[in-house]
Amino acid sequence: MTAQFRFADQLDVAGKTVLVRLDVNVPLSDGVVSDDTRIRRVMPGVRALLDHGAKVVILTHFGRPRGEFVPALTVRPVAQAMSKILGQQVAVESDVIGPGGKAAVSALGPGELLLMENLRFYPEEETNDKDFAERLAGLGDFYIGDAFSCAHRAHASVDALPRIMTSAAGRSFAAELEALNAVLAQPARPVGAVVGGAKVSSKLALLENLVTKVDGLVLGGGMANTFLLAQGKSIGASLAEADMVETANRIMDAAASNDCKLLLPKDVFVAVEFKLGAAHRVVGIGDVANGEMILDAGPEAIAVASRFLKECATIVWNGPMGAFEIPPFDTATNALAKIVAAETQNNGQISVAGGGDTMAALANAGVNDQFTYVSTAGGAFLEWLEGKRLPGVEALRTS
C-alpha cells in the first residue's frame, strides 16, 4: 500500500508554498465552532509543515452553498478555531483564484499560514473543473491531500488538482489508508464486522462486499429487523424494509457460500413507544407482540456476539446496534463496544470504526479513544468498505 503513494513527510517543503486540502466541515453554535475534533485531527500535519518552513495554504469547503456566496457558510469561524489550536494567526482570503489570492499567497513567509475561503462558493469546485484546478495549482508548489472524508467526491480540489501538481498524502489521510488496509486488504484473521443502522437499502453494497471479506458479521439496528423478517420471524411494529426481504435473503445466501457467519439477535428489547422512560421488556424472537418495536438486541444476543468478537483478531465497526440515543436501548451498542475496546487495549485486536452515527455511538459508550482507529470520514469510509475506488485516493496514487 505505502509503495503506491507519496507521503507529505517525503516532500522537501522548506521555503515552498504547499496547498493542503483539508475537511474542516465542523458544526457551529452561534457562529463559533462547537466541536473541533476534525480540525484537531489534521493540525499535527499542518504544524509539521509549518515547522519545516513551508508556506501553507489551506483549501477546504464548508456546508453546501451550491456554487454561490453564502455568508453563513464562511470559513472564518474555522480560522478562529485553527488559530487557537496552532497558537498563531490564521488569515482568511476571499479572492481564492483572483489577484487578491495570488497577492496573499505571495506575501506569506516560511512558517506562515493562509486559509482560503470556502471553495464551494465556486460552482467549478463541485463540477471537477480542470481550468479551476489549474488556477488553484498556480498558487503553490506542492499539493497535500489530507481530507480522506472527501475522497469519494470527484471535486476539483480533491481529484483534478492533485493530478496536475506534485502531490502527496497527508498524515491523517495516510492513517486512514493504513487503518482500512489493515481491516480489509491484509487483515489478521479471524475478521469480524459489526454493522448497524436503520436500513439495509443504505448499506446494501457494504453488506454485499463484507460477506465476501469477513469471517463473521454481527447485524443490529433496524436493518437486522429486515433480516429477521426475511427469516419469517414476527417483528411487530418494528422498523423494517419489506421490499428488501429478497435482498436480505440474497445476502444471507452469499454469507453462507463464503463461510461468513451471520449473527442476528435471538432476543431483543421491545417497547410500544420510543421515548425516555418508556415501558420495555426483553423477549425472544418470535414473541414480539403486534404493537411492539424492537429497539435493541437482548442479553442472549449480546453474549453470543461478545463470544464471537473476542475470537477475532480484526474488527471493523459501522453503526449502532440499537436506538442508542435513549437508554436502555444503548445496552447492546455499549456492551459490544466495550468488549472490542478491551480486546484492543489488552489483547492487541485491530479495531477500526467509522461512518454514520458510529462516532457518536462509541462516544456514548465511552470508548471512542480505545479502538485502534476511529475514522472521521463518513461516506468515504463506507464507500471504501463497499470496495469502491475513491477519486481522491486514485488521484494521489503514484503507481
Image (cartoon, rainbow, N blue to C red):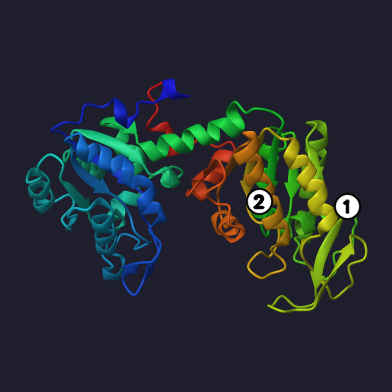
Which of the 4 image quarters holds residue 157? top left
User: Which quarter of the figure is the C terminus placed in?
Assistant: top left
Which of the 4 image quarters holds residue 130? top left
Do tag 2 and tag 1 residues touch (Cβ < 8 Å)?
no
Q: Position of residue 394 (x, y in %)?
A: 43, 32
- Residue tagged 2: 337
CA neighbours of label 1 inside 10 A, class few (<14), some (14 to 19), many (20+): few
Q: Position of residue 366 (x, y in %)?
A: 58, 57
Distance from Cα at disc 2 to Cα at disc 1: 27 Å
Q: Position of residue 74 (x, y in %)?
A: 27, 64
- Residue tagged 1: 231
Label 2 vs label 1, nearer the camera: 2
Task: Choose between 298 and 357: the one closer to the eye.
Answer: 298
Instruction: Pick whichever of labels 2 and 1 is earlier in the sequence.
Output: 1
CA neighbours of label 2 inside 10 A, class few (<14), some (14 to 19), many (20+): many
Q: Is residue 40 left or right of residue 222?
A: left
For label 2, the SS is helix
Q: Amino acid at mark 2?
A: Ala
- Residue under the point 71% across and 54% down: 335
Q: How many marks?
A: 2
Q: Amino acid at mark 1?
A: Gln
